[in-house]
Image: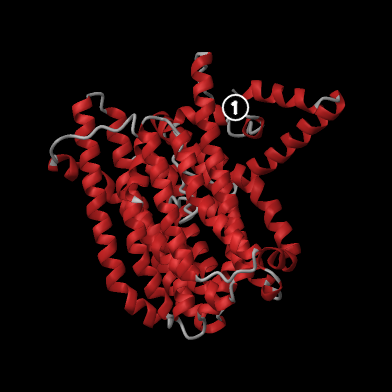
């Protein structure tokens, strides 16, 4: 299962190209990962400068989305009551599931065919077909939102959600040029406009929330949804501005290309949609079941906000592993096996200290992130933080399968994981409420982890414990690296030497 890092309203994850990753991995942060042994070809200095810029904007986009998304959440925890904040969380959960499906169907297909096409006429046909498909999907999303708005508001006992979903019908229309422009830029390996579009999108919402909070003005969810609409419009304008030099349209609609784009993207759509639902079903069930409720969702979100920070190294490594695994698949199963084990080991090197820190200071962290109203719920975070020890294995499983041409197997396992999560949460939420959502999701993750490891061991001879050995090797190397820098009295020089040894 390859779970993308999505922050609705605060930025979108961008798939890094193999070339831009070369420049990213040349920085000291990644250069010290000798356990990964990534080997890249040297290129001309002008090209290196170009890829450095691309990598810079991509990393900056991720960092900006994280700051705006997390910062907005921290303020809303304090500005809204638990009940109102729970409504907003459920609204974002529902819309993000629909949007991730649209992204999955459109993004990879458009980028693939625009990248491989050299003829301007064909590029125009592909872009036009993608836009038409985007319009069709947006229409489907609007119909779904209108159909579910009242039933969902009754199911969750929150009439306000219906109004928010109806407002989002206009927001999703305004996002059409935003997504279209971003994908066209990505196909042309230009990430500058993607960064600025996402920065404007997340920045407008964050600025509005901060302005209202610090001016002691009540934040109403309807106004927040309208702000989200305005942010979508502004971001689309930015995206169109940067994408216009690459954009070509044809005079007619080629239905062959619409079918081709749909055929290519349908499995990615299914996997992304199921994966996002898999990540969100605990909140939906917690909000709907009698043992939970809207306030329970807000409390659970406080723990999830912190836990989701562990997605950053996992998602980053997934982007790194994907092109490497695709290339190494030609070298045989042993190469893919080793790459998977080392990638998971590198992530665990970050996760283990983070988990230990959170286990010790969970109560303080919850209050710092969400405020005094959420004090006393640190034990929920102590459960959810264990997600960070299991998800690296799960996420990289999907990355490897996608990269070696087995998206169908990945999709099947994603559906299986979704079923585990639904059943497990139904049982444990009814038993323990908020704690049940955390225990139920962790139980489903562990069951998924076991089945995926059985598959990987059978087909690739993957050893589940070997990543721990690589993790310890990383700690050893980091210690020796630090001691060498201290002995030489120049840590910067030691860093440069380590980077030269890796690239």
Within 10 Å of disc 1 (Cα), the crowding (few <14, some 14-19, many 20+) is some
Position in image of residue 215 (x %, y %) = 64, 64
Q: How is the image coloured?
A: secondary structure
Give above or below for 375 relative to 50: below
Give above or below for 59 relative to 426: above
User: Tag count in the figure?
Assistant: 1
| 253 with respect to 411 (left or right) | left
Kind of element beneath mark 1? loop
- In the picture, the quarter occupied by the C terminus is top right
Position in image of residue 122 (x %, y %) = 19, 30
Give above or below for 155 relative to 71: below
| 349 with respect to 162 (left or right) | right
Tell me which corner region of the image, top left, top right, bottom left or bottom right, holds residue 194: top left
Position in image of residue 31 (x %, y %) = 63, 30
Q: Residue furthest bottom?
A: 290
Residue nearest the viewer, comparing 68 with 417: 68
Q: Residue at x 61, y 42 (%)?
A: 346
Q: Residue at x 58, y 76 (%)?
A: 82
Q: Residue at x 74, y 37 (%)?
A: 476
Q: Which residue in the structure is indicated by mark 1?
A: 26
Q: Residue furthest top?
A: 44
Position in image of residue 451 (x %, y %) = 45, 58
Residue 326 in view = yes
| 269 with respect to 31 (left or right) | left
Residue 417 in view = no
């Amino acid at each position: 299962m390859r779970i993308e890092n999505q922050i609705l309203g605060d930025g979108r994850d961008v798939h890094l190209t193999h070339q831009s990753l070369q420049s990213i991995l040349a920085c000291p942060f990644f250069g010290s990962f000798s356990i990964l042994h990534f080997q890249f070809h040297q290129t001309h200095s002008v090209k290196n400068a170009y890829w450095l810029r691309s990598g810079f904007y991509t990393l900056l986009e991720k960092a900006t989305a994280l700051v705006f998304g997390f910062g907005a959440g921290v303020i809303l925890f304090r500005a809204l009551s638990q009940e109102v904040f729970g409504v907003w969380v459920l609204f974002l959960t529902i819309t993000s599931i629909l949007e991730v499906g649209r992204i999955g169907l459109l993004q990879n297909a458009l980028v693939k065919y625009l990248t491989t096409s050299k003829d301007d006429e064909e590029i125009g046909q592909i872009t036009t077909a993608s836009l038409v498909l985007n319009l069709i999907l947006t229409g489907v999303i609007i119909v779904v939102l209108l159909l579910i708005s009242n039933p969902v508001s009754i199911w969750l006992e929150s009439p306000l959600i219906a109004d928010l979903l109806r407002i989002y019908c206009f927001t999703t229309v305004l996002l059409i040029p935003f997504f279209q422009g971003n994908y066209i830029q990505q196909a042309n390996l230009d990430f500058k406009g993607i960064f600025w579009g996402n920065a404007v999108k997340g920045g407008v919402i964050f600025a509005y929330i901060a302005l209202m909070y610090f001016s002691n003005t009540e934040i109403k969810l309807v106004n927040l949804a309208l702000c989200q609409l305005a942010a979508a419009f502004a971001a689309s304008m930015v995206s169109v501005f940067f994408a216009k030099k690459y954009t070509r349209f044809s005079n007619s609609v080629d239905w062959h290309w619409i079918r081709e784009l749909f055929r290519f993207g349908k499995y990615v759509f299914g996997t992304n949609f199921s994966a996002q639902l898999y990540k969100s079903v605990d909140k939906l069930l917690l909000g709907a079941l009698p043992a939970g409720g809207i306030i329970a969702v807000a409390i659970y979100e406080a723990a999830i906000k912190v836990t989701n920070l562990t997605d950053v190294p996992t998602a980053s490594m997934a982007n790194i592993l994907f092109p490497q695994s695709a290339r190494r698949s030609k070298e045989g199963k042993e190469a893919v096996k080793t790459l998977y084990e080392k990638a998971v080991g590198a992530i665990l090197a970050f996760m283990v200290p983070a988990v230990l820190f959170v286990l010790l200071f969970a109560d303080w962290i919850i209050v710092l992130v969400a405020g005094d109203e959420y004090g006393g719920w640190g034990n929920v975070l102590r459960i959810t933080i264990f997600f960070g020890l299991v998800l690296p294995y799960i996420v990289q499983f999907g990355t490897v399968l996608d990269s070696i041409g087995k998206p169908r197997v990945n999709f099947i396992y994603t559906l299986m994981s979704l079923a585990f999560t639904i059943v497990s949460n139904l049982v444990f939420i009814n038993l323990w409420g908020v704690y049940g959502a955390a225990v139920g999701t962790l139980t489903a993750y562990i069951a998924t982890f076991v089945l995926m490891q059985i598959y990987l061991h059978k087909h690739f001879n993957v050893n589940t414990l070997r990543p721990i050995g690589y993790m310890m090797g990383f700690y050893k190397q980091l210690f020796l690296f630090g001691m060498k820098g201290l002995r030489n009295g120049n840590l910067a020089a030691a860093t440069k030497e380590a980077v030269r040894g890796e690239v």
